[in-house]
Image (cartoon, coloured by chain):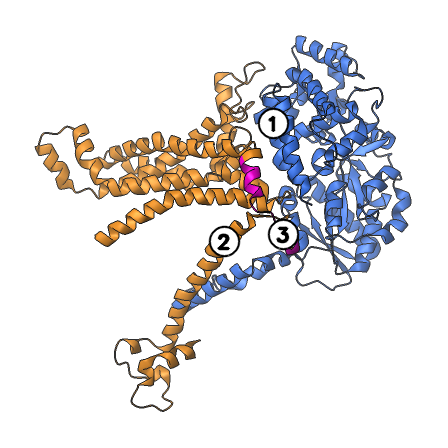
Chain colours: A blue, B orange
Amino acid sequence: MRDLSPSGLSLTGPSRRGVLRGVGGAALLGAGIPLLSACGDSGSSSDPKTVTLGSNASDAVPKKAFASVYADFKKTSGITVKVNTKDHNTFQEQINSYLQGTPDDVFNWFAGYRMQFFAAKRLATPIDDVWAKIGDNFPDAMKKLSKGEDGKYYFVPLTTYPWAVFYRKSVFADKGYTVPTTWDELVALCKKMKSDGLVPIAFGDKDAWPAMGTFDQINFRLNGYDFHVDLMGGKAEWTDPKVKAVFDHWAELLPYHQDGFMGRTWQDAAQGLVAKKSGMYLLGSFVAQQFTNKADLDDLDFFAFPEINSAYGQDTVEAPTDGFMVSKSPKNKDGVAKLLEYLGSPAAEEMYLKTDPSVVAASNKADTSAYSALQKKAFEMIGNAKTLTQFMDRDSRPDFTSTVMQPALQKFLQNPKGIDNLLTSIERQKKTIFATS
Amino acid sequence: MSADITTKTPEAAAEPPPGPAPVDKRVPRGHQRLLTRRDRVALAFMAGVPTILHVALVWVTALASILLAFTTWDGIGFDSIQWVGLQNFRELFTNNPQFWPALQHNVIWFVALILIPTPFGLFLAMQLDKNIRFSRVYQTAFFLPVVVSLAVTGFVWQLIYNPDTGLINSVIGANKPGHYIDWIGDPKLNLWAVLIAASWRHTGYMMILYLAGLKGVDPSLREASALDGANEWQTFKSVIFPTLRPTNTVVLVVTIIESLRAFDLVYVFNKGAQGTELLSILITNNIIGESSRIGYGSAIAVVLLVISLVVIIPYLITTFRKERSG
């Protein structure tokens, strides 16, 4: 934002003309709003020793973890990574205009559909040359997640984490609960917890996205990975009886969810698990961030969402993966290639995880000896998965999930009986949205 | 530009000593010449810059969004704009489960603001106008919510309404399983919950407007009615309130504008979840962010624009008519 300061408005003791000059400056600014996005990388554009990077890691822990990674990269390569950090949600909301303006060379982004969208719009650079060197570091599922629709690589994954059902080991031991592996066992366990005075399933949907996680789990357990992908990609129909069955299962579980979830954030819902008032919580492993006491954290465990349909078992894991992409015309191509090769190495991942242990490495070559028990379990679960999904809003069009699915799922949670009308409405809206390319 | 102005001024051309007399040092004679060249530049700027800003920021953007309402565009590159005619509007009126509730909520917002905080603000203004003790303190206290940003207001109130740790549920013991009152999430409650927050702020706003109006009421009117033996209510009803007519018009317009532009409070409160959908929030959700349904969002914006015009145009017509006749 340095470009803003010489507008003349800050001059002391303004004469009338001084003010006018300032107004003229303001008019120029009004005409030049697109120029503002250029603030990020002005100055050091052609410096071979600098790579610019747009980061969404605004939370304290990830920010520090990334800083340690870039510092390590500088030690080995002599190239400085100039980080331009924006608030996590703001980064996401502005991504369209950011990538069209003058973006940084490299930027933080998500794997899967959300990456492919920008690749298809030619707002990202393919990086097959980098993958020729780092390809051996990653399992096949990760390779699949890093490719665009054209089969070229556009993404370097760094970390991932699983969605699962979290619980307290001590609570299960005290009450003699066992981990449910089938749907019927899960329902029976919920009933038992309720009669024991526990809230069976902690839940908070104020931010509207947690419900999508529940839908994903029930859908790919019940209908399988392929149907889930088709549904997310707009190919399968929401009026399909298979989808209705998902909501029927969900409705069966709803009475065991924590009351008042519409006004509760996931952080508040997690407090129920911390206080041992709630028995289980279906969420990403970032729920561990709410466990600030070491003893509580050690007591936290998770299990994969139970099997519903024996044809699919528990073969799919929802594992959102974060990593890096290259913008459409990076200024320092060699530096970018070097940086991505480093970021795709197990060393970079290990360095990151030293500061942020709430996730696991995307590479299967990374050293797991420093992992906590929770991380080890997460790593195994993701490594053993037959297929990986990202999350509803990463696997489907963001306009569809944010303007249609989020309100629709909230509506279902308020009124589980009106499923048929709801699904017809979703399908109608889906058709219009997916019809526009 | 300045040279243009001087050569085109007829008086300047008809000046007796033609030669290349320096414009700045000309002897001021008559109205026109009071302005030096620099003054004219300054004037041109004063008139020109606001005009350019106004045209660019109001007219061009408004017309652009009207045009965009008939297209579909994901915001990436101008070549991806596609003309779709009335499809966005058809989709909006028939297919969007949030549109009609949003419209309804905007109307409820207006009715609620006019029925509760506005009379209450008038009441407070009447009390403060009596010059009671500490009236400045009360005035500041009631006006404070107006000064606080609406986003902050929303944040504070959602803490009060929080189902688990919020003030209200904690006090009345409604934060236990089975007893939850979900002020923020329950679609039957949340609009009213947020309207209480909005009223809290609006009361102060109305109070200040009415207070200003009351200060302008001629004290002799009160004296006259007191001499005629009118009691306080009669004085208010037959004397004070009719003289507040200009203030009432302003209050009405301000309240309509408030209800149409209601956004920040709700957005912070619960992002316009079911029960609190508003037109402004639908526009934001469709245009801002990754969703980028710019054409569709513009269509909603056009609906909002039309509603605003329907409300504002009659107001402007009556105002101008009054000015002309007055």
The answer, for residue A200, to whether it is visible in the render is no
Q: Is residue B84 within the magenta segment?
A: yes
Disc 2 crowd rating (10 Å Cα; few below 14, some 14-19, many 20+) is few
Q: Given the image, on which type of amino acid does mark 3 rest?
A: Ile
The answer, for residue A393, to whether it is visible in the render is yes
Compute the Cα span from label 1 to label 3.
Answer: 32 Å
* Residue A158 drawn above or below residue A219: below
Q: Position of residue A19 (x, y in %)?
A: 42, 65
Q: Secondary structure at mark 3?
A: loop
Q: Given the image, on which type of amino acid does mark 2 rest?
A: Leu
Q: Given the image, on which type of amino acid does mark 1 rest?
A: Gln
Compute the Cα span from label 3 to label 2.
Answer: 16 Å
Q: Is residue A141 within the magenta segment?
A: no
Q: Position of residue B187 (x, y in %)?
A: 52, 25
Span of residues in magenta: B78-93
Q: Secondary structure at mark 2?
A: helix
Observer-nearest residue: A3 or B121?
B121
Chain letter of disc 1?
A: A
Tally of numbered tags: 3
Q: Would you say the residues marked 1 and 3 are in contact, meaning their CB atoms lie under 8 Å apart?
A: no
Residue, disc 3: B81
Q: Using the rendered view, name the quadrant where residue B227 is placed.
A: top left
Mark 3 or mark 2: whose residue is earlier in sequence: 2
Residue, disc 2: B63
Residue, disc 1: A410
- Which is the main secondary structure of the residues drawn in magenta? helix
